[in-house]
Image (tube, rainbow, N blue to C red):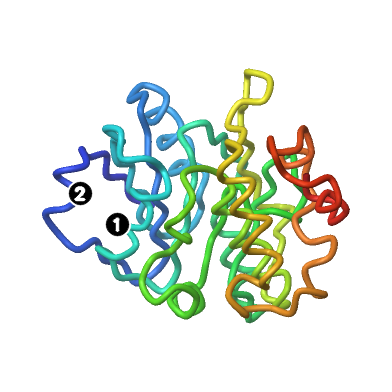
Amino acid sequence: MKIKIVTSPQAALRTWRTDTALIVMPFRDSTRAARAAGLMAMRACAPGLLLAVQDDGEGFVSLVNRLFAGSASPFFGYVGEDAFAGRSWLRNAMDVMATRRAGLLAFNDGKHFGTLACFGLARRSWAQSLYGGPFFFPGYRGPCANAELSMIASGQRALAYAPDSVLLQMECERNAGDPDDADRRLLLERQALGFDGKVAVKALTGAARSELYARRRPAGLPARREANGIF
């Protein structure tokens, strides 16, 4: 696996191409990103390109969407600078994608056990079919974006899990990376509509059940909408 660590302006100067998997890693701490990327490349045991791009305040969702639009690859993945790779993480993930026609694969992040792709690998053709261009729904600012993606994949029976593909999320602070209330509210509103009709609402029951979205109810959200088990 090859590594490219670039600034945000540098990332915009070219189209990033690979005939295997492109994994993007937005980062703010260059030391952490370099360490995480080095370990991921050493333990990938498969070809691919890891593109680490400095986030100058654009935000994870917007930056990933821009990199998705400015790249070409059959598979597109997203990780954070807090990723800790296990051995053969990419090879094992690609083996699963080769044997299943899944749209989205959830890595074993040590937390969600396949119910939510906190770090994920998507088949580009599937991802392009969802929003007409962006990888994540652009209305989100944080991790509710990958929650929606996971719920759509689950509802379409297109979500795969690779338990032997370990990419731990090394959250060292309690509640690190929690979504804000606006994102939580948007996720529930969009879920109630089947994410613009992409899945049947009844198919979403129990999808992406995660403690990440169960800690508290968004302020002002009616209590009756907590029953879906996400918040």
User: Residue 66: which numbered mark, if any?
Assistant: 1
Q: How many marks?
A: 2
Q: Depth check: 59 or 115 in front?
A: 59
**How far, Cα to Cα, is label 1 from label 2?**
9 Å
Other residues around mark 1 within 10 Å, as few (<14) / some (14–19) / many (≥20): some
Quadrant of the rendered structure where residue 213 is? Answer: top right
Identified by mark 2, the residue type is: Ala
Question: Depth-wise, is mark 1 or mark 2 nearer the camera?
Answer: 1
Q: Quadrant of the C terminus?
A: top right
Q: Residue at x 25, y 63 (%)?
A: 70
Identified by mark 1, the residue type is: Arg
Q: Residue at x 35, y 55 (%)?
A: 49
Q: Residue at x 20, y 38 (%)?
A: 7
1 and 2 marks in contact (CB < 8 Å): yes
In the rendered image, residue 212, in percent from the top left (x then y), is placed at 72, 38
* Residue 83 relative to residue 8: left or right: right
Q: Is 156 above or below relative to 13? A: below
* Residue 81 relative to residue 18: left or right: right
Q: Depth check: 222 or 193 in front?
A: 222
In the rendered image, residue 24, in percent from the top left (x then y), is placed at 39, 50
Give the SS element for disc 2: helix
Give the residue number, with chain letter if any, for mark 2.
11
* Residue 26 relative to residue 7: left or right: right
